[in-house]
Amino acid sequence: MKNSFIFCGFDVIYSGSMLGINYRKIESNSVGYKTDYEMFSLDFEEFLWAKGYDDSFIAEMLAHMRTLTPFNEVEMSV
């Protein structure tokens, strides 16, 4: 994977769950090319913000969910 970074400029992200599968088979750890980050999953509201939905649209969506009102065709196409 180090070659992917050096020659192609790719950023590679490994999750902790995938690293744990074969950690005993790893002969060496990349020195100088590894940065550890603690990452957390997004909740639904954060996901909508990341997708570019504004607060008014999110509030309207929440109102539909609370009242169990179906979305119309226009709302479903957004």
Image (cartoon, rainbow, N blue to C red):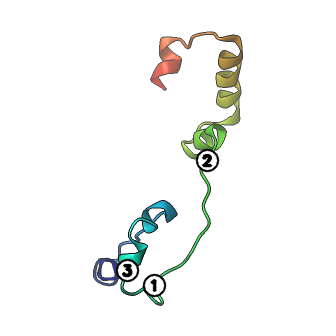
CA–CA distance in space, label 2 to label 1: 27 Å
Residue occupying the far bottom of the picture: 31
The disc labelled 2 sits on which kind of residue? Answer: Leu
**Residue 58 x, y percent position in the rendering:** 66, 30
Question: To which quarter of the image does residue 69 belong?
Answer: top right
The disc placed on residue 46 is none
- In the image, 50 versus 16, the foreground residue is 16
Q: Position of residue 54 (x, y in %)?
A: 65, 36
Which residue has dot 3 on it? 26
Mark drawn on residue 42: 2
Q: Nearer the viewer, residue 47 or 55?
A: 47
Marks 3 and 2, how far apart in space? 30 Å
- Mark in the foreground, 3 or 2: 3
- Residue at image position (36%, 85%) is 27
76 shown above or below 24: above
Question: Which of the 4 image quarters holds residue 62?
Answer: top right
Specify whether 49 is left or right of 27.
Answer: right
Nearer the N terminus, badge 1 or badge 3? 3
The correct choice, above or below, for 56 with respect to 26 in the image is above
Instruction: Give SS at disc 1.
Output: loop
78 or 43: nearer the viewer: 43
Residue 33, which numbered label?
Answer: 1
Task: Give residue 25's quadrant in the image.
Answer: bottom left
- Residue lying at the far front of the rendered structure: 24
Give left or right: position of 57 versus 33.
right
